[in-house]
Each structure stands twice: as C-alpha cells, then as structure tokens.
Image (spheres, grey):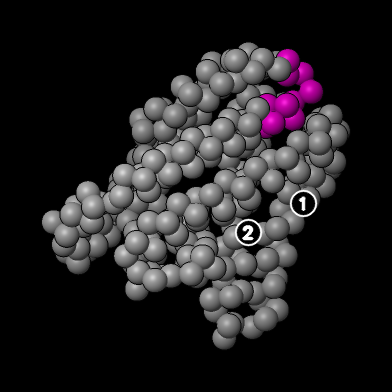
Amino acid sequence: MKPLYNYNSRPSWHKTLLYVLKLALSVFIMWRIARQIDFSTALKDILALPVSLVLVLICLSLLRHIIQYHNWLFALRINPGYQVNKKQVMISYLIGLPLRFALPGGHASIAKIFFVSNSSKMASFWSTTLERSFMTWACWSFASVSALLYYPYLPLWLRWGLIAISTTLPLILYLILGMKQQWQAIQKPYLQQAPKMMSLQIANTLITYLQYWLILNLFIPITWLNACIRMGLTQFSNSIPITIAGLGLRESFAIHFLR
C-alpha cells in the first residue's frame, strides 16, 4: 500500500521552522502559567495526597495500559496479513512506552513498529496510525458532548452537529476504505476490530476522567459529571497542533475550565 502522503516532500527548513515556532509558543505559554502558580503550595498539595489514593491511581493506570495494549493488538489485526503473536505485541507496546518521552508529543513511540513482525513495516505504520486515530476519536467525541452541556448559548444545531461528526468518524473511515480496490481488503477486518477499539477508548477515557475526579475532589467539591465535562474540554487541547504535544495549551485549558 502506497502512503497517502510523502512526509519528505516538505522542505526540511519548513519543518524545522514550524517546530521552533511551536516550541517558542509552548515556552511562552508555560512561562505565563508559571507566573500564576505558587510552586511551594503545589508541591505541598502533591506530597499531601493520601497513600491509598496514590495506590488507586496506580492501579487505574495499569488498567489503562492493559486497555491500550489491546488497542494496539486490535489495530494490528486490521491487516489481514498479520499473524498474531501476543507476546511480541506486548513487548513492542512496552518498548513504545519509554520511546514516548524521546520526542515531544510521543511521536518516537511509532518506532515500536520495528519490534513487531508483520506483512510489512508500512502495514504496522498504518496500524499504529489507526491506533492513535481511535484515541483522537474518543477525545473529540467526549469533547463534543462536553461542549453540548458547557455552552448552552451556542446554537443547538452546531452542538449536535459536532457530536454527529465526531462520533461517526469511524463509520466515515469504513466508507472511505471501500472507495479504492486496494483498501477494500481491510474493510472486513476493520469492521470486526473497530467496535472493540471504540469500546476500549471509551473505557480508557472514562478511567482517565475518574483519575482526574479523584484528585480534584480532594481540593474542591466537584461532581463526577462536572469533572467529566471540564476535563473533556481540557483534553481536547491535546489535538490542537499549535504547540509541542499540547504543552502549555493543555495547562491553559485546565486553568480556564477549572477556574
């Protein structure tokens, strides 16, 4: 399968300039945020977290890793030529975790495709692209539902339109796969794996919101629904590509929606 886009077609100076601009914006936003934070108080609050809560948060994080391992496994299964090797999938997933810190945004984690046997490295590349796409799908879907509840003054057709577009993206992708003969071979396995991946990402997102709520509820009285709405809008910032890995932007969103 030929790649849909040739990343080498863009001049290197262009990519370097874009990266520098994003980095500069990230640093500027973080500097503005740092001026508003009392770090000694923040550190005291972190150290004051109950041990029982920390253990619960760790257990929830382990559960999220199990979910994301299966998300990676199901993404690989979309390729009809892939021969399942769960041990190899687990190893490649674990290797990808530290690689996430190699580059801002976790882009280096894509190197995990070199640690799993597949019909081709390009097939593994598209699998990890689908893996991340379903994470983005969940982020957008929850953010659109959050916007429906948080912005009552926006036109109802606009709020419901955002939900309709976000939630149906996997179906739209399925229809796109049927447009070219070379893509049709993965339509059936995609139809089998996509509902599993969607369910996993819904569960993963809800667990993430639960972790946020458990921490927030120690410091401010906030309902579960309120926490979900505000963190859904905050997490949306991760998909806005104007800073490095949403750095600074995510923190700004959190300060705004938790004000």
Name, please, the residue furthest toward the bottom.
153
Q: Residue at x 39, y 63 (%)?
A: 217
Q: Quadrant of residue 86?
A: top right
Q: Earlier in the sequence, mark 1 or mark 2?
A: 2
77 inside magenta stretch: yes
Q: In the displayed structure, does residue 85 sit left or right of residue 106?
A: right
Q: In the displayed structure, does residue 128 sit left or right of residue 234?
A: right
Residue topped by disc 2: 141
Q: Looking at the rendered structure, which numbered label has been put on residue 162? A: none
226 inside magenta stretch: no
Residue topped by disc 1: 172
Can you give x and y, in whole percent of width and height, for residue 45 in the image? 23, 56
Can you give x and y, in whole percent of width and height, for residue 185 in the image? 84, 29
What is the span of residues highlighted in magenta in the rendered image? 74-83
Q: Residue at x 66, y 76 (%)?
A: 158
Q: In the displayed structure, does residue 195 sit left or right of residue 214?
A: right
Can you give x and y, in whole percent of width and height, for residue 193 in the image? 76, 36
Secondary structure category for the residue under label 1: helix
Secondary structure category for the residue under label 2: helix
User: Mark 1 is on which residue type?
Assistant: Ile
- In the picture, which quadrant includes the N terminus? top right
Mark 2 residue crowding within 10 angstroms, few (<14) / some (14–19) / many (20+):
many
- In the picture, which quadrant includes the C terminus? bottom left
Q: Is residue 235 above or below residue 90?
A: below
246, 1: nearer the viewer: 246
Label 1, label 2: how far apart the Cα atoms are = 14 Å
Name, please, the residue furthest toward the front.
52
